[in-house]
Image (cartoon, helix red, strand yellow):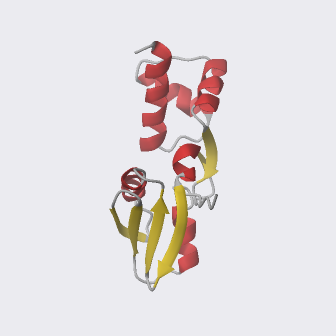
Amino acid sequence: MSVRKERQEAIRRIIRTEKVRNQEELSRRLEAVGFPATQATLSRDIKQLKIARVHDGNDTYVYQSTDAARSVTDLEFSGNLAVIKTRPGYAGAIASDIDREAPREILATVAGDDTILLIPREGYSRESISSAIARFIRVNND
C-alpha cells in the first residue's frame, strides 16, 4: 500500500473515532500515528476523501466523511422509535458510530444491512432526536 493510501486510511480512522475540529488537530493526530503531512497535502487528502466539517449538535464543527452521511435515504418515526434507512451495507457502520458517540438522547441502535432501529431515551422529542443524530446522518432523498 502506498504512503498516501496509508495516510488517507489513517485520516478515515481518526475522524471516525475522534472529534477533530480543524486541520491543525488532524495534522497533530496524524503525526502522532506516524504520518506527518503538510497543510497542502492534508487539504488535498480531505478533498479526495470527501470529508467536510459538520455541526456536531454541541455548538462546534467536526470533520466527517460526507459519503457516510449521504448513505442515509430515509428517517421515519413510529411512536417513540425511529427507523433509519440506508444504502445497502451502510447501516452497521452508521449505527456503530451513533452507539460509540452515544448522544444522551439515544439509548441504543439495532442494525441490519440497510436499516437501523434507533431507540431513544424517554422524554426526548422527535426534534431533539433528529438534532442529536444530525452529525451522523443527512437524509438524502435522491
Q: Position of residue 25 (x, y in %)?
A: 55, 33
In the foreground, 121 or 78: 78
Name the image quarter holding the N terminus.
top left
Q: Residue furthest bottom?
A: 79
Number of disc labels: 0
Which quadrant holds residue 122?
bottom left
On the question of residue 69 being in view, the answer is yes
Q: Residue furthest top?
A: 2
- Relative to 119, is 12 on the left or the right? right
Q: Is residue 65 visible?
A: no
Q: Residue at x 48, y 25 (%)?
A: 30
Left or right of 119 on screen, residue 44: right
Residue 6, percent from left and from top: 43, 21
Which residue is at the front of the view, 118 or 16?
118
The quadrant the C terminus occupies is bottom right
Q: Position of residue 78 (x, y in %)?
A: 46, 82
Q: Is residue 30 above or below residue 20?
A: above
Instruction: Write the residue at 51% across / 63% down.
Output: 133
- 4 is higher (above) or lower (below) than 82: above
The x and y percentages for residue 72 are 53, 58
Q: Nearer the viewer, residue 47 or 121?
A: 47
